[in-house]
Image (cartoon, rainbow, N blue to C red):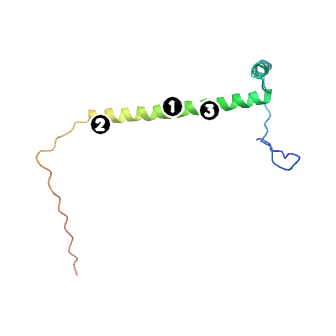
Amino acid sequence: MATRQNSTNGKPKSPRIQVVLPELICEQLNILAENESRTVSNMAKVLIQQGIKNHLKREAKSQTSDTAVNTENFRDTLERQSIKRLKGAPQRIRYTKKSENK
């Protein structure tokens, strides 16, 4: 769970998290931050934001493709069914009220 601290003026700071990284990833993060003139913390924030954005896009695509597959299956099932054609003009249906027995 992220912890939230207060600044000296009493306003809440952004939530903080602590992450343990393997040395290789930490070195790569340092290199990326240096190349983009960012702090390591800011670079980590940017990469996390991009990762979440990409994850949500993939998730949305998979849901869309699932819907498309379901639609195709439904359409195929309907097309395979034998359909009996109606003959003649449609008839009117007349509704009558039931008489109440007293």
Whether tag 3 and tag 1 are in contact, CB under 8 A, the answer is: no
Q: Give the Cα separation between the discs numbered 1 and 2.
A: 24 Å
The part of the image, by quadrant, that contains residue 25 is top right
Kind of residue sitting beneath label 2: Leu
Q: What element carries label 3?
A: helix
The residue shown at (38%, 35%) is 71
According to the picture, the residue beneath numbered tag 2 turns out to be 78
Q: Give the Cα separation between the discs numbered 3 and 1.
A: 14 Å
The part of the image, by quadrant, that contains residue 13 is top right
Judging depth in this view, the residue of 84 and 68 nearest the camera is 68
Q: Residue 37 carries which label?
A: none
Kind of residue sitting beneath label 3: Lys
> In the picture shown, does residue 12 fall above or below 43?
below
Q: If you read the primary sequence from the N terminus, does the residue marked by circle 3 or circle 1 appear first? A: 3
> In the picture shown, does residue 23 fall above or below 58?
above
3 or 1: mark nearer the eye: 3
3 or 2: mark nearer the eye: 3
Quarter containing the N terminus: top right
Left or right: where 42 falls relative to 100: right
Left or right: where 60 falls relative to 34: left
How dense is the environment of label 1, judged by Cα within 10 Å: few (below 14), some, or many (20 and up)? few
Q: What element carries label 1?
A: helix
Q: Give the Cα separation between the discs numbered 3 and 2.
A: 38 Å
